[in-house]
Image: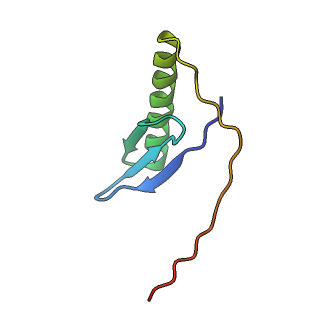
């Protein structure tokens, strides 16, 4: 399966990654490589739990990127 992930700089240090389609699926790490490894593991565990509970696994239909311009007053 393939999922979109969002990678952000942590507030104090390191990185945070989320998988938006899997609500609450978040990971942290000191490096980009570490956070992505941790998120991959979190996604795997998340999906495993859904399957065990007979809950459908969310599928991404498509991906769009929107650009928003913010005008300061």
Q: Quarter of the image holding residue 24?
A: top left
Residue 31: give x, y in percent of width and height.
Answer: 42, 49
Residue 14 vs 59, above or below: the answer is below
Question: Who is closer to the viewer here, 68 or 48?
Answer: 68
20 shown above or below 47: below
The residue at the far front in this view is 73
Q: Is residue 49 left or right of residue 21?
A: left
Rendered residue at 68%/53% (across/down): 64
Where residue 69 appears, as percent x and y from the top left, is 57, 76
Q: Assign the N terminus to one quadrant of the image.
A: top right
- Left or right of residue 26, residue 64 in this image: right
Q: Is residue 51 above or below residue 43?
A: above
Q: Nearer the viewer, residue 35 or 45?
A: 45
Q: Position of residue 51 (x, y in %)?
A: 53, 14
How many numbered discs, if any?
A: 0
Q: Position of residue 60 (x, y in %)?
A: 65, 37
Q: Is residue 5 above or below residue 58?
A: below
Residue at the right extreme, as displayed: 62
- Render colour scheme: rainbow
Residue ID at (46%, 22%): 45
**46, 32: nearer the viewer:** 46
Residue at coordinates 38% horizontally, 44% vertically from top-left?
29
Looking at the picture, tell me which residue is in the foreground, 4 or 61. 61
**Residue at the outermost left position:** 12
Q: Residue at x 44, y 42 (%)?
A: 35
In the image, taking residue 13 as reference, residue 35 lies left or right, namely right
Q: Is residue 63 left or right of residue 20?
A: right
Quadrant of the image containing the C terminus: bottom left
């Amino acid at each position: 399966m393939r999922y979109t992930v969002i990678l952000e700089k942590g507030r104090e240090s390191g990185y945070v990654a989320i998988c938006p389609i899997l609500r609450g699926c978040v990971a942290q790490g000191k490096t980009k490589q570490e956070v992505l490894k941790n998120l991959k593991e979190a996604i795997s565990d998340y999906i495993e739990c859904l399957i065990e509970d007979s809950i459908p696994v969310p599928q991404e239909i498509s991906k769009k990127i929107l650009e928003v311009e913010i005008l300061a007053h």
